[in-house]
């Protein structure tokens, strides 16, 4: 009887582990990106941010957080954001924790993403602020 119970127990483990849904892989965790270009469409204006020797942007993805810093040395300005993120299909869902627009902290926004070679293309819709098209190049 104990022999049959052991076999049934092993079969149950095999069945449940074989039928368990696979966890969605996070293609971003542990990666670092350098901004190539960006276009932001605000309700009243369009702003393009091509990188140059003066303008730099670096994005670092952890397991659940994204941290980005931009620097414009010609103006002696820098900008930092920190978001929680999760991957849902072809979309990144962001929950801002530190953002230049304080009214967006704690509000969710999303960005469609696409990988083309070593580049990451993001098309974001930031509520009440802008639509963004960013191009990033992987550096690690």
Image (spheres, grey):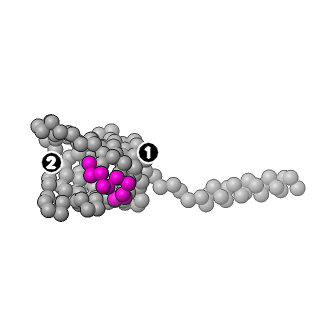
Describe the element under mark 2 as helix, strand or loop. Answer: loop
9 in relation to 54, above or below: below
Residue at the limit of the structure toward the front, as seen here: 103
Q: Is residue 53 visible?
A: no
102 within the magenta span: yes
89 within the magenta span: no
Question: Residue 126, image x and y in percent?
Answer: 28, 59
Range covered by the magenta-colored residues: 100-109
Please identify the quadrant where the C terminus is shown.
top left
Q: Residue at x 43, y 47 (%)?
A: 64
Question: Residue 31, image x and y in percent?
Answer: 36, 42
- Majority secondary structure in the magenta region: loop
| Left or right: 1 as drawn, with respect to 126 | right
Q: Which residue is mark 2?
A: 50
Question: Residue 109, image x and y in percent?
Answer: 34, 59
Q: Residue at x 30, y 48 (%)?
A: 99
Counting residues from the start of the chain, the first of labels 1 and 2 encountered is 2
Describe the element under mark 1 as helix, strand or loop. Answer: loop
Q: Residue at x 30, y 45 (%)?
A: 81
Q: Which residue is mark 1?
A: 63
Badge 1 crowding class, 10 Å Cα cut-off, few under 14, some 14 to 19, many 20 or more, is few
């Amino acid at each position: 009887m104990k022999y049959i119970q052991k076999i049934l127990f092993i079969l149950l483990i095999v069945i449940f582990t074989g039928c368990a849904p696979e966890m969605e892989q996070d293609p971003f965790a542990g990666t670092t990106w350098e901004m190539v270009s960006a276009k932001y469409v605000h309700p009243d204006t369009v702003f393009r941010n091509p990188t140059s020797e003066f303008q730099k942007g670096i994005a670092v993805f952890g397991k659940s957080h994204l941290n980005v810093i931009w620097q414009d040395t010609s103006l002696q300005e820098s900008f930092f954001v920190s978001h929680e993120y999760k991957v849902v299909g072809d979309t990144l869902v962001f929950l801002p924790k530190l953002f230049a627009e304080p009214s967006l902290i704690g509000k969710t926004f999303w960005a469609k993403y696409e990988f083309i070679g070593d580049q990451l293309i993001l098309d974001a819709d930031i509520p009440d602020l802008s639509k963004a098209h960013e191009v990033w190049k992987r550096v690690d």
